[in-house]
Image (cartoon, rainbow, N blue to C red):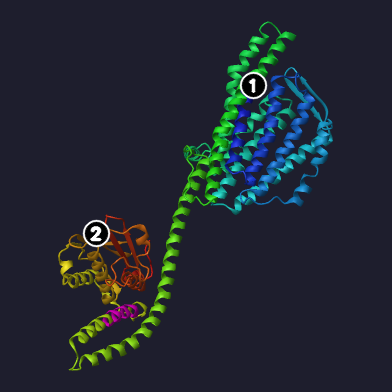
Amino acid sequence: MLVLLHLVALLLLVLLGFYVFVANPRSRANQTFAAFILFFAVWTTKDLVFWNFPDELIGVGAWAAISFVSALLLQYSLVVFAWVFPENSRTPRKLAAMLFAPGIIFMPAAFLGLFWNEVKYLNGEISISLTPIGYLFVAYVYFLFGYGTYILFAKYRLYRGTQMGQQVGAILWGLLITGSLKTVANIILPFFGSYELLPFSSLLVLPGVLIYAYAISNFKLLSLQTALDQLRLFPITYKVAISISTVAISSFIILQIPITWWAFRNGMDSEAWRKYLVFSVVSALVPNLLLVLLIVRSISRPLQKLTVAAMEATKGKYGTTVDLRRSNDEIGVLSTAFNEMSLKMEEDIEKLKQMNEHMLRADRLAAMGTLAAGVAHEINNPLAAMSSLIQSIRREPRLEGETAEQLEIVSTQIDRIAGVTKALTDFSRTRPTMKRDVSIGDVLNSALQLAAYDAAFSKLKIVSEIPTDLPEIWADPDQLQQVFLNLLLNARDAMPGSGSIKIEVRMMDRMIAIEIRDSGKGMDPATLSQAFTPFYTTKPAGTGTGLGLAVCYGIVAAHEGEIELNSSENDGTTAVIFLPLKNNKGAGRR
């Protein structure tokens, strides 16, 4: 029964230490708790061996020496913990060196047996007679215990009423319980000749250790919420530890126990030992291979896939994702974060490309505007003189019929050139906008009325979906009318003879979207990419200047909006204009 209790206590200690340390390995308090568990596990192992297998593995003198040294190391860990918890402070090195210096003498003295005159183990009982240095050691250990407790009590008073104060208070209760039980079992009762509780000494510390771990874990230890949290994020360290322990225990039960029974069933001679060693080595290969498989499957293979995906992303393949089985460990979190980052990067780079194209387009428009202004100025003056001279000649009464006909042709061509130069002037000139509160519905209806005077436009089917409750925007209605009219006439030109135009207005986040969709022949990708380029046109010579969409782009940009064209061959063209609401000027589309 005692051996079972010691094994359970040892297992519980290892689990507590592992759990608390892995929860936050960088915390000094968690590190100190792990050290405390390590020293206490040594104490428990010493009791497990001595009290259950007396005089077979360690003698009573070794048991006493290990007890003294373990007790000292436990107090050292307590003092360090009191220094660092709960602020995660640094250990005061100079103070620690002075406070812990006696240990340099006490630990060798314990192993040399200088703490007792005599120590005996007889009939299941221990009797020990301490020397003066032994009593001095006991006083030193209790001094360390009292010093650590005092520091924690001072911090409890400092943080009283807070979460940290509750944690320190719980640890003080754990120390009080542990110190009282250990003092009774190890000091008071043996002083009066009673050693019955000594075999259970290590078990008496467990309540205090549980309180200790409970407080460090912010009172979540062994709670349902903590269990749920661990299911959401189950660290790889836990998985590896559980895998190793599961394989070890399973292989021991399934393989090692049967091999031991089979090898020694007829006695423990040399042949039995030979069988045991040979088959133990063979049986050890199976769990080791299984462990390698588990580690490769849970760590190596996912990391390899992540590495390959990261290398692909560094080569410019943005949007690369890694396809891993969903897991609730660090690799699962990392793969999810990598996929989100890669997709977001691809989206951001695409937006940067679009912004760059818009900037290049704006630069081209600005350059073409400067050029257009100069060309129009140089052409208009001589053109005006030529037009005046021709008009003067045409007024001559003696003008012959053939000459008059030729002058008419010249006059027509001059008017055509004048139209081009006027378009150039309109494109290059930054006209002052006359902005006011405007209803998009009214502007669109006005543009539709103007377009209806065109005979070809009147043959088209017009579908208009314009809500009546749209908020007003701050804009120049004449300029917006020019934009809408230009887009409507472009749609007409794309559908010679028949077709339909659908106008739809909808609200977006802080924006109004105006969509004009035709059922024409559409544009190929090359044409679509050049649509806003000045002087680029697919219309026959003499029917277009290639400045209409460029002018529309400039007007919409001046209103802090955006214009987009979406088209594919034989599937029509859709022009979408985004304009900010009155209270969101400069907000941009999201």
Could you tell me if residue 12 is visible in this image? yes
335 to the left or right of 537:
right
Q: Is residue 162 left or right of residue 513?
A: right
Q: Is residue 329 magenta?
A: no
Question: Residue at point 74% right, 38% down?
Answer: 72
Whichever of labels 2 and 1 marks the residue nearer the N terminus, that label is 1
Magenta-highlighted stretch: main secondary structure? helix
Where residue 102 appears, x then y in whole percent?
81, 42
The answer to which quarter of the image holds residue 411 is: bottom left
Highlighted magenta segment, given as a residue range: 414-425
Q: Secondary structure at mark 2?
A: loop
Q: Nearer the viewer, residue 123 or 458?
A: 458
Alpha carbon distance from label 2 to label 1: 77 Å
Vertically, is 437 above or below 210?
Answer: below
- Left or right: 280, with 422 as reference point: right
Crowding at dot 2, Cα within 10 Å, few <14 / some 14-19 / many 20+, comes out as many
The amino acid type of the residue labelled 1 equals Ala
Q: Is residue 380 above or below residue 278?
A: below
Residue found at x 55% / y 51%: 314
* Rendered image quadrant of residue 12: top right
> For mark 2, what is the residue?
520
Q: Which disc, if any, is residue 284?
A: 1
Residue 509: in sight, yes or no? Answer: no
Local crowd size for mark 1, using a 10 Å CA cut-off: few (<14), some (14–19), many (≥20): some
In the rendered view, does 91 fall on the left or right side of 508? right
Task: Check the picture and name the quadrant holding the N terminus.
Answer: top right
Element class at badge 1:
helix
Q: Are marks 2 and 1 in contact (CB under 8 Å)?
A: no
Q: Amino acid at mark 2?
A: Gly
The front one of 501 and 185 is 501
As displayed, is residue 312 above or below residue 551?
above
Residue 391 drawn at (x, y percent): 24, 90
